[in-house]
Amino acid sequence: MSVDCTQLGGEQFAPHCCPAMILNPLFVAVVVVFASAVTSCPVLCTCRNNQVVDCSGLRLFSVPPDLPLDTRNLSLAHNRITAIPPGYLTCYSELRVLDLRNNSLFELPIGLFWTSKHLSHLDLSYNNFSHVVADMFKEAHRLVHIDLSHNPWLRKVHPQAFRGLVQLQNLDLSYGGLSFLSLEALEGLTGLVTLQIGGNPWVCSCTMEPLLKWLRNRIQRCMSDTQLAECRAPPEVEGAPLVSLTEESFKACHLTLTLDDYLFIAFVGFVVSIASVATNFLLGITANCCHRWSKASEDEEI
């Protein structure tokens, strides 16, 4: 039985449709496989509208291997995930929101966000990160919100950790183990609106002055929790809020010596040197006299 491609189901078709009809079974199989990959939902997870995937609170030790390709919102919160495989997000270029809070992550693989051109919200709170490395969020230039709070082992943020994130508005670094934060890490965040840094053991030494000065200048337009951020050291400012420190607090960091100071130091040094030489000379003479007196006494006794 032949099929007239120009008359199929009452519709007019162009003559070139015949080859497609011959390959129709194969075409259907490919479409079915592709549709399955797009719409499949990981076991135990909940998927809504094929774009929201909720795998939270499932006690997972690893990330689910397959997600719908058009996933926009992925929640892996409240699990026991310790690591994310390199390239895990490569196929999910539509991802907007990634929630990884309350897991056991201590690092992210290099290049995790290389294809995450649309990612805007990232939650890494309540994990075990010890440091934020340079270019950790590289290529995720549309990030608006990053939450790194409640990482108690977080000790270091690389000066170039947030490089290129000009659209970042909310950054939460509260309740970690930070004692110092480089101003360079924040200077490039021109769109920053809120900054949370309370609950860290800040060491308010001279190295912190640039950051504190930056915070004072932005406090009107950059909402923060600096009222809750307190100095842990040195002892003279322990417990003092960061915002209470003024330029007077760092006066000792800018002490400079005048010409008179240098001349006085040189004079004192010269006097001390002369005194030292004179003292040694007198001690030498005294020792020599004592030695001669002792020897003369021995001769008389003989």
Image (tube, rainbow, N blue to C red):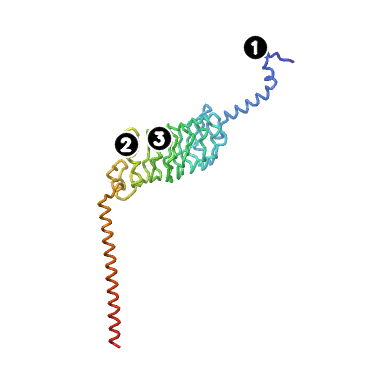
Q: Quadrant of the C terminus?
A: bottom left
Label 3 – label 1 distance at C-alpha: 58 Å
* Residue 96 percent across, percent down from the top left: 48, 30
* Residue 264 percent across, percent down from the top left: 25, 55
Instruction: Identify the mark nearer the N-term, 3 or 1.
Output: 1
Instruction: Identify the mark nearer the N-term, 1 or 2.
Output: 1
Instruction: Provide the secondary structure element on which disc 1 rests.
Output: loop
* Residue 148 percent across, percent down from the top left: 43, 39
Residue at 28% x, 70% y is: 281
In the visual, does 87 lie left or right of 123?
right
The amino acid on which the numbered mark 2 sits, given as a three-letter code, is Asn
In the visual, does 241 lie left or right of 25?
left
Instruction: Provide the secondary structure element on which disc 2 rests.
Output: helix
Q: Which residue is mark 1?
A: 12
Where is 141 relative to 155, above or below?
above
Q: Which residue is mark 3?
A: 189
Of circles 3 and 1, which is in front? 3
Where is 207 relative to 64, above or below?
below
**Image quadrant assignment for residue 220:** top left
Q: Which residue is mark 2?
A: 217
